[in-house]
Image (cartoon, rainbow, N blue to C red):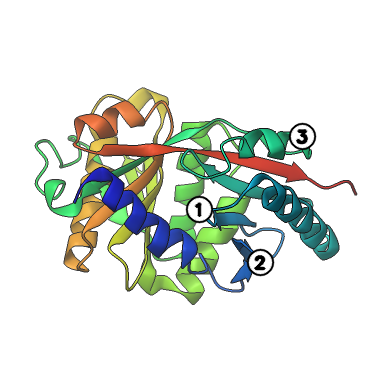
């Protein structure tokens, strides 16, 4: 398939017909949009908008979403804008309505079969990769995330633990450890009935970067995706991880930018 065909498939399967990303959340159609709504510790936001959305429709939809989440009492929600979404000035309209743009990421996709046999796909000497299945493992994932990204992992801890306890079949969490200490972690969302699995949160602590931990985390998840019958893996990649993934054979389909609206309380 050509990149534009894969992008159209991605839009249709994972955005227009999105599935809830965890227990207790729901996906709703709201006029020309699809949104996910959950509790304050869940991801809340707009995931898709109709391709023919025009300026007038966009402004009305933006106002409706602000009113919706304000009525729920949430502190914030996100509009996940892709570079091919319309109208062309949708980002400017979101900013004018009070949204703040966070750093853009590159939407990357690769055929699963191209990743399962990557050279150097095994972890470096002294590092063990394992799937997380319990609360103790979740703590290691959260600690690795905090050390790799320098951000608080409180919400991540809640989301991973909830998924493993209530809906483990379509979710994978991994931790990489050296001498009992977490040096990297990663997650994978499996979307049944689609061609895609999503790679999320892959990160390595600074002193272990450049040794193949990240590559091993990608390959490990790709093997699981292949075993489950998925055709593609998808990543929203930061500027740090995108060059690595391109070298592994991922293709860019565009960019995605989180626009966050913080409600006054």
Image coordinates for residue 114, horizontal then vertical, percent: 13, 47
Q: Does 264 sit above or below residue 225?
A: above
In this rendered view, identify the residue nearer to me: 116 or 98: 98
Rendered image: mark on residue 196: none
Specify the farthest residue to the right. Answer: 265
Residue 88 falls in which quadrant of the image?
Answer: top right
State which tag comes first along the sequence, 2 or 3: 2
- Helix, strand or loop under label 1: loop
State which tag comes first along the sequence, 1 or 2: 2
- Helix, strand or loop under label 3: helix
Rendered image: mark on residue 96: 3
Rendered image: mark on residue 30: 2
Left or right of 143: which side holds 31? right
Mark 1 vs mark 3, CA separation in Å: 21 Å
Image coordinates for residue 47, horizontal then vertical, percent: 55, 55
Left or right of 89: which side holds 180? left
């Amino acid at each position: 398939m050509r990149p534009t065909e894969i992008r159209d498939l991605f839009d249709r399967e994972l955005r227009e017909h999105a599935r809830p990303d965890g227990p207790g959340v729901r996906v709703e159609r709201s006029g020309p949009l699809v949104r996910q709504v959950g509790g304050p510790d869940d991801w809340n936001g707009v995931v898709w908008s109709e391709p023919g959305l025009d300026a007038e429709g966009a402004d009305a939809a933006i106002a409706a979403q602000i009113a919706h989440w304000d009525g729920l009492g949430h502190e914030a929600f996100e509009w996940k804008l892709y570079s091919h979404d319309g109208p062309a000035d949708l980002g400017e309209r979101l900013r004018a309505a009070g949204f703040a743009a966070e750093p853009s990421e590159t939407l990357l996709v690769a055929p699963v079969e191209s990743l399962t046999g990557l050279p150097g796909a095994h972890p470096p000497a002294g590092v063990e990769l394992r799937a997380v299945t319990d609360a103790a493992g979740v703590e290691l994932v959260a600690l690795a995330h905090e050390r790799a990204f320098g951000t608080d992992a409180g919400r991540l801890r809640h989301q991973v633990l909830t998924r493993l306890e209530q809906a483990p079949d379509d979710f994978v969490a991994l931790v990489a450890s050296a001498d009992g200490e977490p040096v990297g972690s990663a997650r994978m969302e499996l979307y049944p009935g689609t061609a895609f699995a999503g790679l999320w949160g892959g990160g390595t602590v600074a002193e272990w970067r450049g040794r193949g931990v990240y590559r091993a985390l990608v390959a490990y998840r790709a093997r699981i995706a292949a075993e489950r019958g998925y055709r593609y893996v998808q990543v929203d990649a930061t500027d740090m991880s995108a060059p690595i993934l391109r070298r592994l054979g991922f293709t860019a389909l565009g960019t995605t930018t989180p626009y966050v609206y913080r409600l006054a309380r």
